[in-house]
Amino acid sequence: MTDLQPLWDWFRELYATTGIKLTIFYDAFDRARFFNGFLTSVRLMSLCIVASVAIGIVGAWAQGSRLRLFRAVTAGYIQFFRNTPPLVQLYFFYFALGSYLRTTNATGIEVPLVSNFTWAAIGLSLYAGAFNVEIFRAGVEAVPKETAEAAEALGYSRLGAYLHVTLPLAFRISLPALNNNLVNLVKTTTIAYAIAVPEMLYVANQIWSDELNVTEMMNVLLLIYVALIGVVVFVMGRWERAMRIPGYMP
Amino acid sequence: MIGAGSTDLPVLKPFRLKAASRSSALPLTAQHGVVIAGALVISVSIGDAQAGPGAPSILDTLLKWTPLLAKGFALNIAMSVLAMAIGTALGVALGLGLISLARLVRASSWLVTQFFRNAPWLVLLFYCVLLMPFEVRIGSVIVPLPGWAKATAALALPVMANVAELVRGAVQSIPSGQWEASEALAFTRMQTLWLVILPQCVKRMTPPWMNLYAIVVVGTPLASIVGVSEAMTLTGDVLSSEGRTELLVPMYLYLLTWFFIYCYPIARASVAVERRFAVR
């Protein structure tokens, strides 16, 4: 950390000369908590991306199921999560469901069984997952039946044809829509603020309450989020190009 | 676009997402109502079972607070409609900037669009609510800016960017023959846009625009975080004033139901409109 000291000093100098108060750089305490907030945000985002994609795949499979119950439950899940506010969903999980999942610890104090970070991860994954189910299902439907039939004619089993022929094609078709949804998910993670998950927005709020540098912190936040999303867009764009199906022009 | 070693022989024909195939995923209509009512009834009866003796029934409590919630929900709707109106007006202008022939206009519109599309809504909300003045002076008239107005402005910004992208996409999806034909008829660029291209774009933009509206509606409870007393804030107030834990699940479900009842028909309608306009 010592080699960065001149940089921190430069920010202190910046405050002294221009009044731009970026305590997150020159104040060790603010720097540490802001960095932790940043890490929490990134952890929440990565966790939700993986979980929501998994939900999407399982859900798309359940929607194609022969059992009517499976289809109905999936359809209900999708419609519920798509047409209600994610913030209220999060409150519902954390306050309403969380009020039942409580336990008493050794000192006799009631503590929640599921932490607010976990609830945020669950709630946001379910929310984004509802969109992913639709996206993957559309992708599977887009693969012509003939392709799977041709694979079966070549001796693939039904499952083999699905895993090795239909799914890879479906995944590539779904990618652009999936990108959009994942970007949305990354943006939506900020609502974890509402249930006091110490992510970046929450920490920034603490800092600007302590240091009274609202404008600076807001601008820093906006820039970091736009940059983070830029990274997601860039990586997914590269991946999309790498996975492109030759000759397929949507 | 073609990477090294890859061919451009068609492996898979282009596929257009069919409106009909989207709706096939929504086999439930009346059943949804039954499910929601069922969930509410179950949660209410569980809550009743937990309530101490002598406590008023959950259903009565929900009904007692319904007028207040309705008032809050009306604010949600008002905010969403206003944000959508302002955002659409600005977004169409920005979208025309995106397809402008002047390079500077195009580049700056692109920057604005990308910025507001990528910024999280909640951060924009904080930005507007904390950094906008509580009143503005226009000449000698002082216009107060209450919290909900600032929140509406904050919601209008991402709407603007998304509408701009919709406009750009729709204009580009119009076959170039339309441009060439109008040019052959000696239309200026302005006339071509307003009289030929944009009227056709309206049809293509309507379904995604309706979806965007539904997203704005479910985004309005975010305003509760910055202290606007809309339905979510009022629900929290009701819960803290009642102070009964058995009320938590029914109350939140009740609020979720309000939003669902409002948004679900919009989602259905957008699918129907998409299917109708898909016929060419």
Image (cartoon, grey):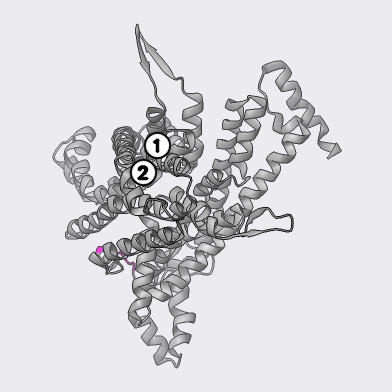
Where is residue B188? Give x, y as percent.
20, 33
What span is in magenta? B14-19
Please name the amino acid that badge 1 sits on.
Leu
Residue A20 seen in the figure: yes
Q: Quadrant of the C terminus of chain B?
A: bottom left
Residue at image coords 82%, 33%: A5
Q: Which residue is mark 2?
A: B216
Where is residue B255? Give x, y as percent.
37, 49
Among the two numbered marks 2 and 1 on one chain, the one whose residue lies closer to the N terminus:
1
Q: Is residue B265 left or right of residue A247?
A: left
Q: Main secondary structure of the magenta part?
A: loop
Which quarter of the figure has residue A180? bottom left
Q: Which residue is mark 1?
A: B155
Residue A245 seen in the figure: no
Give how far apart the Cα atoms at labels 2 and 1 are.
Answer: 7 Å
- Circles 2 and 1, Cβ within 8 Å, touching? The answer is yes
Q: Chain of mark 2?
A: B
Secondary element at image label 1: helix
Work out whether A5 lies above or below B236.
above
Q: Is residue B16 magenta?
A: yes
Is B50 in front, or is A24? B50
Judged from this view, the residue extending furthest toward the left is B185
Where is residue B222? Give x, y as percent.
44, 41
Q: Is residue B69 magenta?
A: no
Q: Residues within 10 Å of mark 1 (few under 14, many from 20)?
A: many
Secondary element at image label 2: helix
Q: Is residue B252 left or right of residue B260?
A: right
Please name the amino acid that badge 2 sits on.
Val
Which quarter of the figure has residue A136? bottom left
